């Protein structure tokens, strides 16, 4: 019987060591009285004007690559997409750059491309021959707001609801 009590006591101690308590992580990383970052904001109108078709430029921080028919799209992390003519895969020709700040992903269905634009989902079409970008639809606030490096949401900074957080910068003391 004593062996059974020791066994149960041992199992209880083992399980107790797995319990999580608030104190396990040590002191709070973010001091609520000293916030080191401040949000960079834009009005909705200015934010929506940031999607643009621009001349081609060199790829500097490549992300995902998408190939659709004879076109290739290379994501420039958090900035947009490089557009290439991939008719000759051994020598793709750079055509343009689609600037979509905050974008890291792309989906293509037929001739319509979908991407996230920070908090919005946008549907657009790139017309190669006309060299134009046609915005078809914008689903506002389809994604959560940008979180600060300190792990705080825009509400913690008192950002007005009509403003959109497009980034964070260190506060200048």
Image (spheres, rainbow, N blue to C red):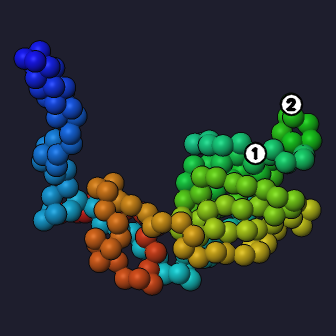
Residue at point 67%, 61% (across, down): 115
Left or right: residue 3 compared with residue 93: left
Q: Position of residue 82 (x, y in %)?
A: 71, 50
Within-10-Å neighbours for mark 2: few <14, some 14–19, many 20+: few
Mark with earlier residue (2, 1): 1
Question: Where residue 12 sits in the image (x, y, percent)?
Answer: 16, 30
Across and down, in percent, residue 5 comes to: 10, 23
Depth check: give the residue in front, 3 or 84: 3
Q: Is residue 140 above or below residue 119?
A: below
Determine whether 18 is above or below 131 in the image.
above
Label 1 sits on residue: 66
**Quarter of image, res 6:** top left
Residue 122, numbered label: none
Q: How many marks?
A: 2
Residue located 20% across and 39% down the image: 19
Q: Using the image as rendered, state which of residue 36 and residue 136 is in the foreground.
A: 136
Look at the image and tell me whether residue 17 can be seen.
no
Q: Residue furthest left?
A: 2
Residue 119 location (% of width, % of height) = 53, 68
Dot 2: element = loop
The residue shown at (35%, 70%) is 154
Mark 2 = which residue?
Answer: 90
How crowded pointer 1 is (Cα within 10 Å; few <14, some 14-19, many 20+) is rated as: some
User: Which quadrant does the N terminus fall into?
Assistant: top left
Mark 2 or mark 1, whichever is nearer to me: 1
Horizontal relation, residue 83 to residue 4: left or right: right
Q: Is residue 70 left or right of residue 151?
A: right
Residue extending farthest to the top is 3
Where is residue 123, by image quadrant?
bottom right
Q: Quadrant of the C terminus?
A: bottom left
Query: Residue drawn at (53%, 66%), measured in percent from left and top?
Result: 143
């Amino acid at each position: 019987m004593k062996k059974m009590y020791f066994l149960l006591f041992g199992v209880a101690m083992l399980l107790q060591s797995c319990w999580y308590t608030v104190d396990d992580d040590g002191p709070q990383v973010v001091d609520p009285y000293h916030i080191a970052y401040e949000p960079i904001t834009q009005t909705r109108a200015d934010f929506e004007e940031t999607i643009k078709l621009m001349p081609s430029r060199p790829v500097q921080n490549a992300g995902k690559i998408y190939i659709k028919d004879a076109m290739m799209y290379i994501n420039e992390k958090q900035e947009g997409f490089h557009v290439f003519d991939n008719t000759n895969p051994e020598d793709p020709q750079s055509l343009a750059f689609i600037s979509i700040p905050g974008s890291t992903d792309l989906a293509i269905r037929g001739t319509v491309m979908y991407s996230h634009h920070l908090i919005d989902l946008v549907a657009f079409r790139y017309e190669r021959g006309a060299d134009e970008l046609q915005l078809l639809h914008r689903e506002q606030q389809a994604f959560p707001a940008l979180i600060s490096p300190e792990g705080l949401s825009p509400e913690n900074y008192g950002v007005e609801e009509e403003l959109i957080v497009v980034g964070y910068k260190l506060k200048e003391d």
